[in-house]
Image (cartoon, grey):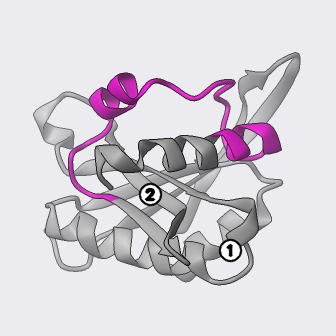
Amino acid sequence: MRPADWNAVRRIYLEGIASRDGTFEEKAPTWKKWNQSHRRRPRLVAGANGRVVAWAAVSPVSARSVYAGVAELSIFVAASARGKGVGRKLLFELVRAAEEAGIWTLQAGIFPENKASLAIHRRCGFRKVGRRERIGRQGAVWRDVILLERRSRSIG
């Protein structure tokens, strides 16, 4: 992912927000805010027909050094590219790139209703850690999140 990809990344992010099953966020951040809150590596985009159709990136879970190799991932696929294997391929590549960057644990919080995202995470080696009940509100509605994680087999 390059700064020049931001408009496409933001558009896909807004689709995820509008779906109400992709994120708790209510609006997309600015490039500056997004850039500051995500690790430099890995940040990936997937393209089709010359267009960005998906993106994935990781955020640190803590500033404490003991958690330097633990990151939370975000992955969003454009509505036009869903169901075509793009998300699975991108997540496999994110796992590979994360390990290359020294990340030993990836975690993801996914709404239970987002069956496609849960399925691709399982196919990529993630396991369910638990269900965080009523962890956040989306408008007036309390939502649960399934917490998944994947531990590296090559680091540590």
Which numbered mark, 1 or 2, is in the foreground of this view?
A: 2
Q: Residue furthest top?
A: 140
Q: Can you say whether 51 is above or below 74 in the image?
A: below
Residue 27 covered by magenta stretch: yes
At x 49%, y 42%, the residue is 7
Q: Which residues are magenta?
A: 14-43
Viewport quadrant of the N terminus: bottom left
* Badge 1 amino acid: Ala
* Badge 2 amino acid: Ala
User: Is residue 52 shown left or right of residue 154?
Assistant: right
Viewport quadrant of the C terminus: bottom left
Mark 1 sits on what residue? 119
Q: Can you say whether 155 is above or below 101 in the image?
A: below
**Mark 2 or mark 1, which is nearer the start of the sequence?**
2
Element type at mark 1? helix
Tell me whether circle 1 and circle 2 mark residues in contact (CB < 8 Å).
no
Crowding at mark 1 (Cα within 10 Å: few <14, some 14-19, many 20+): few
Instruction: Measure the C-alpha gap from mark 1 to mark 2.
Output: 16 Å
At x 25%, y 79%, the residue is 153
Q: Position of residue 114 (x, y in %)?
A: 77, 57
Mark 2 sits on what residue? 56
Q: Position of residue 113 (x, y in %)?
A: 83, 54
